[in-house]
Image: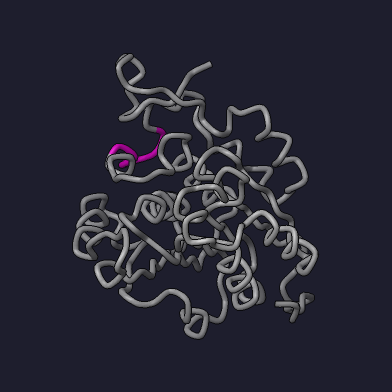
Amino acid sequence: MLLLRDSFDSERLDVPAHTPLWRDCSFTTLMEPCKALEALSNYLPSNPNRPFYKGQERVEAVHSTYKNEGYGHFFYALIRAIKPRRCVELGVLHGFSLLAVAAALRDNGVGSIRGIDLFEDYPYRHAQQKDVENYIRACRLEKWSGITKADAFPAYDRHKDLDYLHVDLSNDGDTYRFMFKHWASKVSQVILMEGGSADRDQVEWMVKYRKPPIVPAIDEIRRAYPDWNFVVLAPYPSLTIAVRTAPRKNCRPHECF
């Protein structure tokens, strides 16, 4: 099996290798119920250590905990498969996932993504807004992506209709509850939420500050929103994929939270 190495370099044995998440035995099983994602495998590379889309080397050079298990490849393939037009990312940090999505939108020929983050106004781990803007320009993805410096939590008031939402805001269980309460009725295709595995619930800051765990929150949300199919990709940091299974016009937001 080909293992994923940093900088796509399969010859450098000093670089730690990881199994790409889509090569994990659980991936196919998890994806089987999601008919909307059937085309996803068509856009995943046979060799994870070689660039498979234009500018991927620049995207993969951006720091992210998503990189080790091949989540960048997954973000790109997902967007190529579902072909959304209106995309929002809440919590940008250095812009890794936003850039992968923007590259896929470019290659689809339609759509754009808006990232919302406090950047240097966030008191904990953050990136500089100007640095992320420079990454976007370096990747030549300005036409398909942009960022706004703002608090991401009230952003639902400024958006009516979306196809794709990705939330990565130091997520905990209450973040999940808040986002589905305010966004589920607005999103027509897919919601991605960072986290979702039992290991992610045990990270140091979640335990230290007694943050509400994500795993039980997903169980609550799954029951409250039957028009969504939920899949959790476990490789750290893990990713929860919620795929709408019924047309949005037939759905009603639940008032359980």
- In this rendering, the answer to whether 20 lies above or below 2 is below
Drawn side of residue 173 relative to residue 94, left or right: right
Quadrant of the frame with the C terminus: bottom right
State the residue in front, 160 or 230: 230
Drawn side of residue 237 relative to residue 61, left or right: right
- In this rendering, the answer to whether 85 lies above or below 203 is below
Residue at 46 percent across and 26 percent down: it is 18
Drawn side of residue 142 relative to residue 134, left or right: right
Drawn side of residue 247 relative to residue 133, left or right: right
Q: Quadrant of residue 51?
A: top left
User: Furthest residue to the bottom?
Assistant: 157
Residue at 64 percent across and 62 percent down: it is 189
- Give x and y (percent) for residue 100: 40, 49
Residue at 36 percent across and 18 percent down: it is 10
- In this rendering, the answer to whether 227 lies above or below 250 is above
State the residue in front, 127 or 20: 127
Q: Quadrant of residue 223?
A: bottom right
State the residue in front, 3 or 206: 206
- Give x and y (percent) for residue 213: 61, 58
Q: How is the image coloured?
A: one colour
- Give x and y (percent) for residue 132: 25, 59
Numbered circles on residues, count = 0
Residue 65 lies in the magenta stretch: no
Q: Which residues are magenta?
A: 52-57
- Give x and y (percent) for residue 209: 48, 61
Residue at 79 percent across and 76 percent down: it is 250
- In this rendering, the answer to whether 61 lies above or below 139 is above
Q: Main secondary structure of the magenta part?
A: loop
